[in-house]
Amino acid sequence: MNKYSTSPLEITARIDAALADAGLDGPLIEREPLPLFFSLLAETIGSTRVKEDTPQAIIADQLWQWSVKQCLGSMALEAQVNDLVQETLDLAQVHGTLTDIKRHELLTYQTQLLHKLQRLQQGHDLHAQLQAGLHVKR
């Protein structure tokens, strides 16, 4: 592999090795899967209010609002969440913080979040149908 086709994971591994060589390594909260996921999610949607202790319903609502602004449909939003989870898993694996339990916690969170997003979509669809019905009757 030439120097122009280095993957982000390889770059991260090299940075980690350089930090370890300099004596600057150690556990950082952003290397743990769930905090890393929240950090990536916050960066993606441009919100500083996405943290591990933020209720999942609020995170789902923020994601939903972001997807509307981005003109993303429900499938694209689900794909975005899945991509963030996969990126989190890959980075946590590189950092050596991914255990079976932590993987399970992240995947469980992903499933719950996607269900909340689906309910938001259903509520939005129902609201749109009701609004369309009201406009037809007028």
Image (cartoon, rainbow, N blue to C red):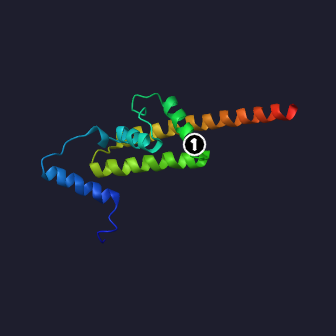
Q: Residues within 10 Å of mark 1 (few under 14, many from 20)?
A: few
Between residue 75 and residue 64, name the one nearer to us: 64
Q: What percent of the width, then of the height, locates residue 51?
A: 40, 32
Q: Quadrant of the N terminus?
A: bottom left
Residue displayed at 28% across by 58% down: 11
- Residue 83 vs residue 65: left or right? left
Secondary element at tag 1: helix
Residue positioned most to the bottom? 2
State whether residue 14 is above or below residue 89: below
- The number of callouts visible is 1
Residue that appears at 71% across and 32% down: 127
Comparing 50 with 98, the one in front is: 50
Name the residue carrying label 1. 69
Residue 134: percent from left, percent from top? 81, 31
Indicate the amino acid at tag 1.
Answer: Lys
Which quadrant would residue 50 be assigned to in this image? top left
